[in-house]
């Protein structure tokens, strides 16, 4: 039944009124590319994960400010670089590795908790009289450098023999009230990036590394039911600042090569 006097109608809350018109997510179909142009490091570039959403916000009656955008967290990380029978280097997230936390923020390290603040977010300042419609988008990929020689050695003899990487992420489309921190999860996406590169250090530079798998990454899942955001996904440190480079020799004790930044 309609309201007889509109003044008595309680306006819908922001949570109930914001509408996600469209969500798209994919990983580019191209394989990981390998760059052997440096005599010091091997570089590789994975295909991009991409997410975009078109959002409709009806008129906001109150004097309030909402940020809508993408938040991402890493749930799992394996990143091993093997050097023949010498051992392996490994980028690790200690708290995630030891299961002290469920996920770690993958923010840009500045605009917590957001992945970024250019195309990744949009701000709606109330009160507004008209609908606001906008698109927020993000992309992510890996472009690391891996030393040809053992990272704890003074030798520059190439010994890198294998690179394996397996990382999982959850990405949320979220609206947050800047004054009250009220958080509305609008969409949840899960995705994974895997990698295995075989390296023959005996071969000449430019002919050492071969991508073994996968040639095409599995596509992201846009979940039908939203997942909650773990606390650690919203606060410092982010994954880049928390990661540690370890050297794990075949014989002897592990050692820290590069400590965390925080």
Image (cartoon, helix red, strand yellow):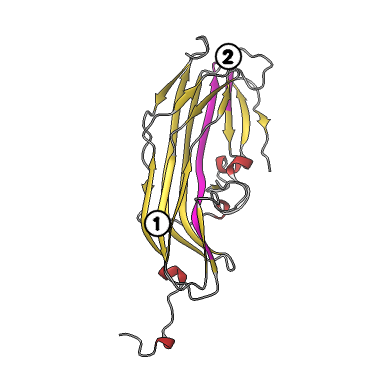
Task: From the viewer's perspective, tell me whether residue 109 is left or right of residue 34.
Answer: right
Task: From the viewer's perspective, tell me whether residue 234 is left or right of residue 4.
Answer: right
The secondary structure type at the circle numbered 1 is strand
Whether 82 is among the magenta residues is yes
Task: Give the percent coordinates (x, y) of residue 200.
Answer: 49, 13
Of pointers 2 and 1, the one earlier in the residue sequence: 1
Task: Give the percent coordinates (x, y) of residue 139.
Answer: 47, 43
Q: Which residues are magenta?
A: 66-89
Whether 41 is among the magenta residues is no
Depth check, front residue: 55 or 225? 55
Residue 244 position by quadrant = top right
| Residue in view at x 50 percent, y 44 percent | 75
Mark 1, residue position? 54
Quadrant in the picture for the C terminus: top right
Task: Give the percent coordinates (x, y) of residue 38.
Answer: 57, 19
Mark 2, residue position? 158
Specify few, some or many for label 1: CA neighbours under 10 Å numbering under 14, 14-19, or 20 or more.
some
Task: Give the percent coordinates (x, y) of residue 9.
Answer: 41, 84
Query: Looking at the magenta stretch, what is its main secondary structure?
Result: strand
Q: Compared to 36, does 188 lie above or below?
A: below
Cα separation, mark 2 vs mark 1, equals 48 Å
């Amino acid at each position: 039944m309609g309201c007889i006097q509109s003044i008595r109608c309680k306006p819908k809350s922001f949570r109930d009124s914001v509408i996600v018109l469209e969500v798209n997510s994919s990983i580019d179909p191209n394989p990981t590319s390998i760059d052997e142009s440096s005599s010091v490091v091997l570089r590789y570039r994975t295909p991009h994960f991409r997410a975009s959403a078109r959002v409709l916000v009806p008129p906001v009656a109150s004097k309030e400010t909402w940020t809508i955008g993408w938040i991402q967290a890493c749930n799992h990380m394996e990143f091993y670089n093997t050097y023949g029978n010498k051992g392996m280097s490994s980028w690790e997230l200690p708290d995630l590795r030891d299961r002290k936390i469920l996920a770690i923020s993958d923010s840009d390290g500045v605009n917590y908790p957001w992945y970024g603040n250019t195309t990744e977010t949009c701000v709606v300042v109330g009160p507004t009289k008209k609908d606001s419609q906008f698109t927020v988008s993000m992309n992510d990929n890996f472009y690391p450098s891996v030393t040809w020689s053992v990272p704890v050695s003074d030798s520059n003899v190439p010994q890198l023999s294998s690179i394996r990487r397996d990382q999982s992420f959850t990405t949320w489309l979220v609206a947050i009230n800047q004054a009250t921190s009220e958080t509305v999860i609008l969409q949840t996406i899960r995705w994974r990036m895997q990698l295995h590169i075989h390296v023959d250090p005996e071969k000449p530079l430019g002919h050492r590394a071969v991508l073994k798998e996968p040639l095409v990454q599995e596509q992201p899942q846009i979940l039908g039911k939203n997942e909650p955001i773990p606390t650690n996904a919203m606060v410092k440190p982010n994954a880049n600042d928390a990661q540690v480079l370890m050297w794990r020799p075949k014989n002897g004790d592990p050692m820290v090569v590069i400590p965390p930044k925080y």
